[in-house]
């Protein structure tokens, strides 16, 4: 009698495995966290991700790939079998960007620089979004096919989860009939899973053939857009640096804020011109103040350890003349163990707040607007350095609402770059009314926070005020004890008539290069 065969357990059925990645560029945790931080800090990048994700799947992964392509030192492209089929179209843009010398030029600007790489990613992403929205890169049918494959991938994962649940179902406690029904259910689920996987492979193969048809045209259009982006990026980087040097914010700007600044400067000729003018005016004003004022007083507080050479005790300097003690001096200098004086500054009380009324009427369009805002931003920088509150009131006609902005209410009187750009870009136009902004400025001076402040009024003077209002304004000025400095923008048609009714001092733009500049940048 032949021996009975041993029953062997059925081999586990291999489950379909989808590629784990939607990104084509290999990245580490630092790359991913840097991109995620940029997206969290930059509203423009966040909006781009949201809008692009409504057109094609894995748009966020495409932006992350662009960021890594520009930021990383070593760029490694993943194999096709490790990336989801629904992300296949993203490779078209990545390959197009890497062709030619354009990629090398962009890499020189963005390599290992989060802010610049993020700005370039944003500009390139907006170009891709524009191509997709206008159906120049993909038509609507191709986009639907991408979403169809994305849904098919989800179906495969759902069937796979159902099959795993059926495999793990305990059959020991079931009856013979129950076990039979369970096996039938497993076979049915397995068939559905195999069918979903086969359908996914078929759709992916067809999509790949369709994308080969449009790949050349899409890549060509993207390359032409990338050339424009390269020029915008170079200009934006230069202007961002100029703007940052022009108006120090008092703190180190995070990469996301630098990205937003570069985005707003890219292609904005008014902001570029304003940044250059403010830079020259700020240099002149700060140089004048440095020459006019002495250093703040300081006194010796105690003796401490450190490495500040000009505050060392005399006997420490004597050790430099001794051959052996000189070596000990060098050692203690590196360890910051030398004895030195500790100084305590005598804190001077700052001047009062500054309220700047800025004319935004139609007569101020063009060079007048640039000049007026250059003076305003220079005064803002002076206020920041002197720890003085600064409020801007932009006005035009009586019917137009005032734009009132507190520019440096942050800790240590830091200036928010976003508010500076909002002030620089805002121009309401329309008629001119002096009474409304000056009444608002007086209401501000009545509050305890802006008590003992002064008003700076910047305009071309083309307006009239009622005599009764002017008389009441002078009485209120005397009661509150503030001064009003008027700056006449005299680079075109202008008038001094109304300013004489309520101003303590009047300075014109043409005088800002002479000794009269002290009335504005020093005495205020």
Image: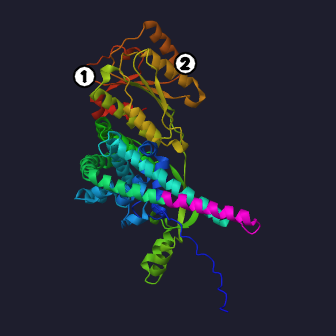
Residue drawn 30% across the image and 35% down it: 270
Residue drawn 43% across the image and 76% down it: 320
Position of residue 18 measured from the top left corner of the image (x, y, whole percent): 48, 62
> What is the number of the mark on residue 174?
none
Eye-nearest disc, 1 or 2: 1
Q: Residues within 10 Å of mark 1 (few under 14, many from 20)?
A: few
Which of pointers 1 and 2 lies earlier in the amino acid sequence?
Answer: 2
Viewer-nearest residue: 115 or 21: 21
Secondary structure found at label 2: helix
How far apart are the two marked residues, 1 and 2, measured between alpha carbons?
A: 35 Å
Identify the image quadrant of the C terminus.
Answer: top left
Q: Residue tagged by mark 2?
A: 479
Q: Which residues are magenta?
A: 170-196
Position of residue 454 measured from the top left corner of the image (x, y, whole percent): 48, 27
> What is the number of the mark on residue 492?
1
Would you identify the image quadrant in which residue 262 lies? Answer: top left
Residue 91 in sight here? yes
Secondary structure found at label 1: loop
Viewer-nearest residue: 410 or 237: 237
The mark total stands at 2
Viewer-nearest residue: 438 or 223: 223
Position of residue 96 measured from the top left corner of the image (x, y, whole percent): 28, 55
Q: Residues within 10 Å of mark 2 (few under 14, many from 20)?
A: few
Q: Is residue 184 highlighted in magenta? A: yes
């Amino acid at each position: 009698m032949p021996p009975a065969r041993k029953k062997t357990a059925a081999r586990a059925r291999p489950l379909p495995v989808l590629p784990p990645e939607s990104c084509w560029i290999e990245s580490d945790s630092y790359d991913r966290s840097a991109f995620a931080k940029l997206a969290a800090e930059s509203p423009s990048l966040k909006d781009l991700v949201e809008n692009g994700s409504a057109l094609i799947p894995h748009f966020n992964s495409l932006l992350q790939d662009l960021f890594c392509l520009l930021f990383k030192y070593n760029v490694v492209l993943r194999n096709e079998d490790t990336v989801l089929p629904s992300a296949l179209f993203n490779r078209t843009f990545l390959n197009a960007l890497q062709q030619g010398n354009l990629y090398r030029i962009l890499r020189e600007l963005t390599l290992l620089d989060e802010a610049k790489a993020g700005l370039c990613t944003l500009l390139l992403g907006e170009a891709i979004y524009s191509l997709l929205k206008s159906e120049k890169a993909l038509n609507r049918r191709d986009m639907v096919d991408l979403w169809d494959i994305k849904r098919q991938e989800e179906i495969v994962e759902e069937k796979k989860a159902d099959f795993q649940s059926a495999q793990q179902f305990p059959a020991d406690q079931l009856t013979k009939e129950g076990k039979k029904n369970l096996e039938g259910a497993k076979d049915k689920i397995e068939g559905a899973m195999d069918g979903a996987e086969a359908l996914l492979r078929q759709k992916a193969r067809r999509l790949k053939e369709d994308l080969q048809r449009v790949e050349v045209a899409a890549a060509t259009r993207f390359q032409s857009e990338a050339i424009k982006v390269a020029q915008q990026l170079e200009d934006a980087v230069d202007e961002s640096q100029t703007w940052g040097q022009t108006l120090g914010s008092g703190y180190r700007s995070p990469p996301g804020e630098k990205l937003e600044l570069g985005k707003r400067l890219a292609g904005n000729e008014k902001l570029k011109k304003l940044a250059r003018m403010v830079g020259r005016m700020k240099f002149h004003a700060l140089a004048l103040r440095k020459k006019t004022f002495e250093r703040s007083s300081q006194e010796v507080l105690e003796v401490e350890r450190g490495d500040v050479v000009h505050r060392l005790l005399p006997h420490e300097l004597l050790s430099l003349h001794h051959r052996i003690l000189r070596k000990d001096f060098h050692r203690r200098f590196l360890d910051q163990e030398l004895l030195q004086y500790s100084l305590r500054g005598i804190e001077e009380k700052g001047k009062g707040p500054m309220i700047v009324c800025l004319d935004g009427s139609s007569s101020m369009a063009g060079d007048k607007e640039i000049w007026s805002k250059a003076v305003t931003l220079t005064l803002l920088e002076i206020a920041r350095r002197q720890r003085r509150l600064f409020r801007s009131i932009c006005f035009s006609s009586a019917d137009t609402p005032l734009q009132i902005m507190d520019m440096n209410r942050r800790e240590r009187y830091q200036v928010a770059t976003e508010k500076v750009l909002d002030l620089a870009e805002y121009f309401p136009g329309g008629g001119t009314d002096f009474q409304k902004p000056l009444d608002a400025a007086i209401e501000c001076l009545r509050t305890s926070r802006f008590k003992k402040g002064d008003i700076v009024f910047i305009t071309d003077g083309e307006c009239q005020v009622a005599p009764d209002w002017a008389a009441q304004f002078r009485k209120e000025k005397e009661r509150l004890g503030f001064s009003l400095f008027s700056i006449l923008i005299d680079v075109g048609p202008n008038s001094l008539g109304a300013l004489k009714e309520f101003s303590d001092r009047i300075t014109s733009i043409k005088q800002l290069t002479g000794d009269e500049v002290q009335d504005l940048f020093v005495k205020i």
